[in-house]
Image (cartoon, rainbow, N blue to C red):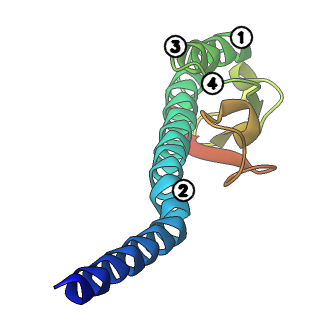
């Protein structure tokens, strides 16, 4: 009977050792996967925010009475509402009010991923996201 108990104890110890080794191998994956998911969702939100800001800005720019100041104000309003950091907005034309009807106007909105990451920049570090929107002057 005691021989059987000692075999069961050694088998239980080996099982615990195997379980600990499996846990040590799986733990990094179990930690990195949710963090990567959160970061990817954050970058999708950032890309969507830049696209919306560009769209709203170019909608102001293509109006017959649109100005550069109004266009930039609208873009910056959206960017501020969505808490995008260190963004830049550029227009394809020098003065929106002087552009003739039928001319395409392009707005490019850019933001660095590092400044807008939720967690330290592991996955998207050093990259920038850009959204470009083009519409024709009315």
Residue 120, given in percent of the width and then of the height, sits at 70, 39
- Across and down, in percent, residue 3 comes to 26, 89
In terms of secondary structure, where does tag 2 sit?
A: helix
Q: Provide the residue designation for mark 2.
A: 32
Pick whichever of labels 2 and 1 is earlier in the sequence.
2
Relative to the observer, which residue lies in front, 53 or 82?
82
Q: Secondary structure at mark 1?
A: helix
Depth check, mark 3 against mark 2: the one in front is: 2
In contact (CB < 8 Å): disc 2 and disc 1? no
Residue name at image x 46 percent, y 68 percent: 20
Residue under pointer 4: 84
Label 3 vs 2, first from the N-terminus: 2
- Whole-number angstrom distance, CA of label 1 to CA of label 3: 18 Å
Above or below: residue 14 compared with residue 23 = below
Q: Nearer the viewer, mark 1 or mark 3?
A: 3
Mark 3 in CB contact with mark 2 (< 8 angstroms):
no
Could you tell me how far apart the alpha carbons at marks 1 and 4 are, in whole angstroms? 20 Å
């Amino acid at each position: 009977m005691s021989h059987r108990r000692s075999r069961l104890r050694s088998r239980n110890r080996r099982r615990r050792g195997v379980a600990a080794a499996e846990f040590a191998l799986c733990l990094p994956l179990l930690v990195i996967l949710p963090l990567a998911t959160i970061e990817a969702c954050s970058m999708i939100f950032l890309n969507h925010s830049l696209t919306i800001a560009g769209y709203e800005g170019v909608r102001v720019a293509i109006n017959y009475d649109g100005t550069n100041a109004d266009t930039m104000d609208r873009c910056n309003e959206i960017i501020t509402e969505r808490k995008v950091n260190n963004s830049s907005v550029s227009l394809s034309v020098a003065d929106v009010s002087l552009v003739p009807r039928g001319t395409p106007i392009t707005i490019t909105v850019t933001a660095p991923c590092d400044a807008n990451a939720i967690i330290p920049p592991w996955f998207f570090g050093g990259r920038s996201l850009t959204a470009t929107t083009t519409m024709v002057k009315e």
